[in-house]
Amino acid sequence: MQALSVLLIVAQFFTGALDAVQSQLLGVFDIFNRNYSLEQFARNLNVLIGPVRNPSYPDLQLKTKSAVILDQDSNRVLFAKNDDERLPMASITKIMTALVVLDKYGSHLDTVIIVPAEATQTSGSKMYLYSGERITVLNLLKGLLIHSANDAALAFAYDIAGGQDNFAQLMNSKAQTLGLFNTHFINPVGFDDPDHYSTARDLGELTRVALVNTTFAEIVAVKTTVARDVTGKFRHPLDNTNKLIGRYDNVIGVKTGTTDEAGASLVASAIGDSGQKVIVVLLDSPDRFTEGKEALDWALKAYSWIEPLQ
């Protein structure tokens, strides 16, 4: 990626991007008045105005039904395709499931949960929990996010809310708080339902919020691990359903989803050479991992972030 000097970016900002950030001008002037290092100065401008498009780089072409690419720091949309269309989201649902869990247990991840029989009877992807098994919140979160375990999602739903319906209400309340007004949940797993939907744009914002949580970010970057119950008797091998993890060093998350109605979907995140992070959401892609990596690489090459002069 071509490094851009602070002076060049500031000039581009005042000549080309003024209208888009007019309400934030006081914040721009404020960063001039502080004793920032060049690195801090560049990061603050990146957060405020986002990356700059390289006009000579070709446009991105994707076959996925819906997509969005976001700059994680500024929340700027770098690419969009049908990004406000309401669609099934399959197990990408579990990003919100995890946020509700972290709201409840964020500072107490060693809390022990007793797995209910209802969780073990679910279908689809599972970590194969046992009825009555005692397992920590952290190990259940690993099963939920790494292995996309439906039984882990239901164990959380029964523990926190007494069942799926009440837990879904917590998910919807969280969605409203985050401004995800084109998103609605019926269950914590991602099973198909006409009233269980989201958009690429909403899911991009949901992921951006989730990745701020260090526990979430660390878990979704794991390729493979083993979760155990508190006694060590039960062992649950976990392989990441996101096949980009471990295959590409710059891919650092986050979640897959597949159902008959949703097709093959993916949310992925990557980090650039200068620490810049981008998020891609693909809903109903014919080749989600190929398109996902292509989209991440395109964003990191088609845009330039501010870098301090050396």
Image (cartoon, helix red, strand yellow):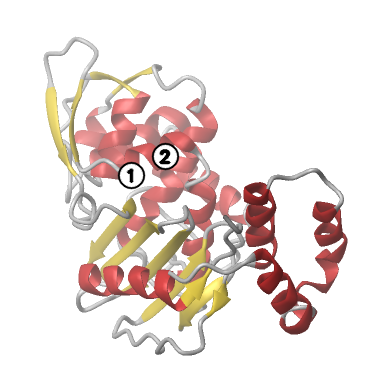
The image position of residue 127, as x and y in percent, is: 17, 37
Question: Marks 2/1: CA distance?
Answer: 6 Å
| Residue 268: percent from left, percent from top | 35, 60
Question: Which residue is drawn at the image coordinates 17% and 48% (left, top)?
Answer: 125
The kind of secondary structure element at disc 1 is helix
Label 1 CA crowd tier, 10 Å (few <14, some 14–19, many 20+): many
> Residue 227: percent from the left, percent from the top?
20, 27
Label annotation for residue 220: 1
Residue 262 visible in this rendered orientation of the protein: no
Residue where numbered disc 2 is placed: 216
Give the crowd class for mark 2: few <14, some 14-19, many >=20 residues within 10 Å: many
Q: Are marks 2 and 1 in contact (CB under 8 Å)?
A: yes
Asked whether, in this view, residue 233 is left or right of residue 41, the answer is: left
Left or right position of 102 against 189: right
Number of labelled discs?
2
With respect to residue 304, does 179 lie above or below? above
Q: Residue at x 32, y 50 (%)?
A: 189
Q: Quadrant of residue 37?
A: top right
Q: Quadrant of the N terminus?
A: bottom left
Q: What residue do we see at 55% from left, 66% from top? A: 305
